[in-house]
Image: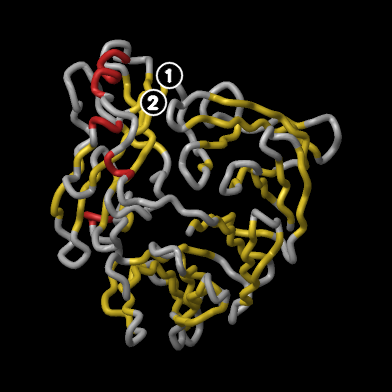
Amino acid sequence: MKRILFSIVLVAASLVAQGWQAPTKRLFYVAAWPGVMLRYDPVTDTVTGQAPFRNGVHHEMVLTADKKRMLVVTGQKQHVEIVDLEKMEVVADHSFARDGQVVRIDDIREIPGGGRWYVRVERIKKLLDRWEILEPEWVEYKLEGREETKSMKELPRSIRSGAKISPDGTKWHVFGKDITIVDPVTLKEEGKIVLSEPLFAGMGAFSIRGDDFFNNTNTAAYRFAWTMTDPVKKNRTFTGRFDIDLATNRIIPESIKEWGVQNVWRVQRTLDNKIGIATGGGRFGGGGGSRAEGEGEADVTAATYDLETGKKLKEGRARVRENVFLSAISGDGSKSYWTGRGHEFVILDADHKYLKTVELPGEITRGVFTVDS
């Protein structure tokens, strides 16, 4: 297996690297109780901006495909507020309230091309003597005019599962055994990026793991970690990395790198995509930590990996408070940020030893959103 893969790796430099510039700045965005968004600079470890919500407590947040705005569900789940991340202020407020009904927004998804959302709503109708629970529905919402243009019980079948907006913002890319390309207007399949068929004899099918290394900012290509079941020894799985050319919708053979027999999991990457940090010890992105003897404390383990070779570079263990999880890393990988219940970042250094704790103006909810530019 290894001989087959290495025989097709011709050059170290990927073709898709041409024309794509790695971002140089990283910022974190978090929502804090009871109703404010915070912008955090991991270079200075300070809060550099606050954006109060107009309708109080937030319930759901979605980062837009262009990474410039955050969609925040507020107002007892009846409003979607749009926060401009550069201005750090709410620039629009869309209400889904209806007379005589209790409305709850359960999910929201951008539609490629901009200007439309799919919003899943739950409604309870107020009658004279009782409440009637209506069937949940998806509505297609047009931002211009603030109108619900269509309602449906389910999302269209072609994008019901695994659909994401393409890096150029114009198509649906539906991730499954293959990546299906779907037109957002007609909702018909326009093409396919084949993963389920072996690229060469003696290989198995690729299965994508994790997020795009380019974070959907490279319109020319995707870069993913992959797993592959050994065609001969079925109980063995190989892992690695490859690029997908979005002009031809094909895997670039020259970009395939094998990492060996690893367990690919969720990895936080540096700005240049060369280094990854994951929780766990023995395997790539493995498990979490163990509870320490001191009440309210736990040992967490983190490891640093070379994302070119998949090799572990270092590993460290730190004693921190209980129930914190790896949420983000600094752009250069020199610090990792751990959050959980509470209002602080627990920060580990490059060797995964405890560095410091930074308290924030409110309790963190809904995770940490990393935005690179």
- Compared with 253, 345 (above or below) is below
Q: Secondary structure at mark 1?
A: loop
- Tell me: 172 left or right of 135: left
| Image disc number at residue 239 | 2
Residue 55 at x, y = what percent?
59, 80
Residue at the image point whose x is 34% and y is 52% from the top: 218
Question: Dot 2: what SS?
Answer: strand
In x, y percent, where is residue 110?
A: 36, 66
Residue found farthest to the right: 294
**Do labels 1 and 2 touch, CB within 8 Å?**
yes
Q: Disc 1 and disc 2: Cα gap in Å?
A: 6 Å
Looking at numbered disc 2 in the image, what kind of residue is underneath it? Thr
x 26%, y 75%: residue? 150
Q: Amino acid at mark 1?
A: Val
Residue at image position (50%, 76%) is 81
The figure's colour scheme reads secondary structure
Q: Earlier in the sequence, mark 1 or mark 2?
A: 2
Q: Quadrant of residue 255?
A: top left
Within 10 angstroms of label 2, few (less than 14), some, or many (20 or more) residues? many
Dot 1 surroundings within 10 Å: few (below 14), some, or many (20 or more)?
some
* Mark drawn on residue 236: none
Task: Give coordinates of residue 186: x percent, y percent.
Answer: 15, 65
Residue to which mark 1 is pinned: 261
